[in-house]
Image: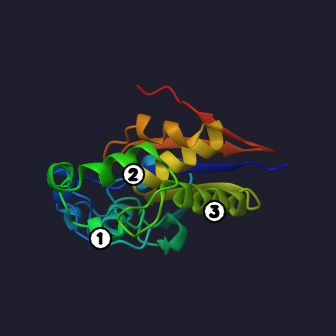
Amino acid sequence: MPATRLTLICHARTLAQKLARFPLDEPLEMDWQALAGSRAGAFKRAPRLLSGPEQRTRQTAALYGASVETVPALRDCDMGRWQGLALDDLHREQPEALQTWLADGHSAPHGGESVAQLCERVAAWLASLSERPGHVLAVTHPLVIRAALLHVMQCPLASFNAIDVEPLAQVELRFNGRWRLRLDQRD
């Protein structure tokens, strides 16, 4: 059975990340246009390039190539009323709601998507990828990458907030009958 290779890449840094805010559809901090295509040679053969629909993921994907397919399943978690708000402000103004969201993966006090719903969406997307062999490079968000890792590692929802995903971080997953996490040696 031919394998599916999935390289998940977190979008480059945004001002919202720098300020510890839940994101809006903001651009990258870097001059991505000057760097467009600069990472296109990072892989031996050009992978199928996918991106979430947000500006920050599309701009990051442009670093890896010009032919990018936008995939709605790779969109960021819908944070509802909390979009654009700083974590410090939420901690001060809605501490119980924030704590509930952090402790209970099924809660969505912000009126958006729960962590459980995000994980279900990402698991369904991974299932669709497993049917199509080849290398896929998907530029997405920290929370989407966390959800993919929970699914592949079969971790409980309580592990979701124990994973940190930095800007431009890469995670390699392989499917050959089942999903596996692959850790590569870097020079």
N-terminal of the pair, mark 1 or mark 3, is: 1
The secondary element bearing badge 1 is classed as: helix
Q: Residue at x 52, y 56 (%)?
A: 137
What's the distance in space between the residues labelled 1 and 2, CA to CA? 13 Å
Name the mark nearer the viewer: 2 or 3.
Answer: 2
Q: Quadrant of residue 134?
A: bottom right
- Residue 1, relative to residue 34: is it above or below? above
N-terminal of the pair, mark 1 or mark 2, is: 1
The secondary element bearing badge 3 is classed as: helix
Disc 1 designates what residue?
A: 81
Question: Can the viewer see residue 3?
Answer: yes
The numbered mark at residue 101 is: 2
What's the distance in space between the residues labelled 2 and 3, CA to CA? 24 Å
Q: Quadrant of residue 151?
A: top right
In the foreground, 81 or 29: 81
The secondary element bearing badge 2 is classed as: helix
Q: Quadrant of residue 130?
A: bottom right
Q: Is residue 179 left or right of residue 137?
A: right
Q: Residue furthest right?
A: 1
- Residue 78, relative to residue 99: is it above or below? below
In the foreground, 140 or 100: 100
User: Where is residue 166 drawn, in percent x and y?
Assistant: 32, 42
Q: Amino acid at mark 2?
A: Trp
What's the distance in space between the residues labelled 1 and 3, CA to CA? 26 Å
Disc 3 designates what residue?
A: 125
Q: Amino acid at mark 1?
A: Arg
